[in-house]
Amino acid sequence: MAAPLDMTTENISGTFVMNKELSDDTDKILERQGVGWFLRTAIRLATITLHVNHYYKDGVEHIDIKQTLTGGIEGTEENRTIDWTERKHTDKLFGPVVSKSRRIKAEDLPNEYLSVGWLSEAVESGLIHSYVVSDKPEGSKGYWTAEQAWGFEIINEQKRHVRHVYFTSEEEIIKAKLIYDYAGPYSKAI
């Protein structure tokens, strides 16, 4: 289902389901992040739902995302404070990471892949820029970075929530686009 016409990155609260037919395959990214074959296969087969709560607290923007997989299985949790401050976190899937997030104009993103293709309202409001790095020494096995830009695009004639992923590891650079169908207003994950 298409995202509401009035939805922008200024408030992306809602429930979104990954459209795996339209999204790029993320198996190689997950492999480079150290996720084993069995778990990658389960993720590939599962329906992934994002429960996004976008709010302000004490004047600071926050985006909390709880992920669930088919059958209500709990996935990863992303609690983003949109202030470009580094925060350490131990992710259930990826292990120890350091992340930071901010609102940014498309032209100020660090590479063209992250900055192109967005709807004008996403560009005007600013995109959400997420930067996550594995908490390992740079140059060591398993070191990776994942930059994302979040916004809205028209995909197959429908407005959809999209994430551009620019992933780097010691082996390669991988670009992927994750596309989500709107499934309704925000609801707390099970």
Image (cartoon, grey):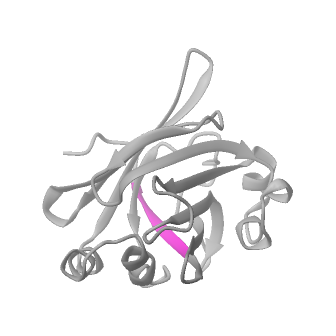
- Provide residue 11's location: percent of width, then percent of height: 58, 40
- The quadrant of the image that shows the C terminus is top left
What residue lies at 38% left-to-right and 74% top-to-bottom? 30
Q: Is residue 141 left or right of residue 82?
A: left
Residues in magenta, as a range = 177-183
- The quadrant of the image that shows the N terminus is bottom left
What residue lies at 80% left-to-right and 50% top-to-bottom? 105
| In the rendered image, the vertical position of residue 1 relative to residue 45, given as above or below | above
- Provide residue 117's location: percent of width, then percent of height: 74, 71
Q: Is residue 4 visible?
A: no
- Provide residue 57's location: percent of width, then percent of height: 53, 20
Quarter residue 67 falls in: bottom left
Q: Is residue 158 visible?
A: yes
Name the one closer to the observer, 124 or 24.
24
Name the one closer to the observer, 20 or 36.
36
Name the one closer to the observer, 70 or 165.
165
Which residue sits furthest left? 71
Q: Is residue 172 left or right of residue 91?
A: right
What residue lies at 56% left-to-right and 77% top-to-bottom? 176
Magenta stretch: dominant secondary structure: strand
